Structures are given as structure tokens and as C-alpha cells.
Amino acid sequence: MSTFDRLLSLVEEQPLSRSLPAAIRIATTIGDEELACWIRLELMGYLADNPAMTYHTVVPEYRSVAVEWRDDYRRR
């Protein structure tokens, strides 16, 4: 079994915490930087301190969280 095949089976069979780092290796190996960047954003968050986050990155809608802020007196 080749290294690529082992990585591919890891991606398919393991939890995301183990398979996404392997998927980055695959994306980098095949030269798909867009996929590698997306995986890094998913793993480390769409945050300013994530090196994969750029000025042009659009945070996907599924990453939005609806919140309602209230003060100490429970006022909106």
C-alpha cells in the first residue's frame, strides 16, 4: 500500500482530529493549496491569528453562530 493510499484510508476511517491533518498532507502533495487552506481554516478557526486567514477570506455561513448579548441585568 502506498503512502497516499494509507493517508487516504486514514482520512476515510479516522476522526476528523486525525484525518484533517492527513488531508492537509494530501492536498499539499498534490498541489491543491486552496483545499489545504480550507482545512487549516476549519481546524484552527476563522480567526485573525490563523495564518490561513487572509483579508479576502469569506467566513462560510455554517461557521456563523447566532448569539444574543445581555448585560448583568439581563437587558438586551
Image (cartoon, rainbow, N blue to C red):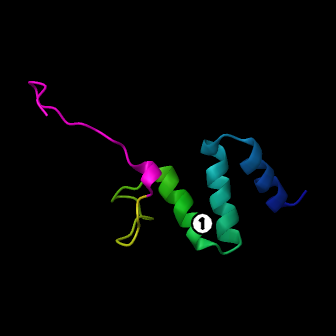
Residues rendered magenta in the picture: 60-76
Q: Is the magenta region chiefly helix, strand or loop?
A: loop
62, 52: nearer the viewer:
62
Residue farthest along the top direction in this orientation: 73
Q: Residue at x 29, y 39 (%)?
A: 67
Q: Residue at x 84, y 57 (%)?
A: 5
Q: Residue at x 11, y 29 (%)?
A: 75
49, 70: nearer the viewer:
70
**Crowd class of label 1 (few under 14; some 14 to 19; many from 20; radius 10 Å):** some
Q: Is residue 67 magenta?
A: yes
What residue did someone put label 1 on? 35
Q: Is residue 61 magenta?
A: yes
Q: Residue at x 62, y 51 (%)?
A: 20
The spot of residue 17 in percent (x, y) is 60, 43
The spot of residue 65 in percent (x, y) is 36, 43
The spot of residue 23 in percent (x, y) is 66, 57
Q: Is residue 45 above or below residue 73?
A: below
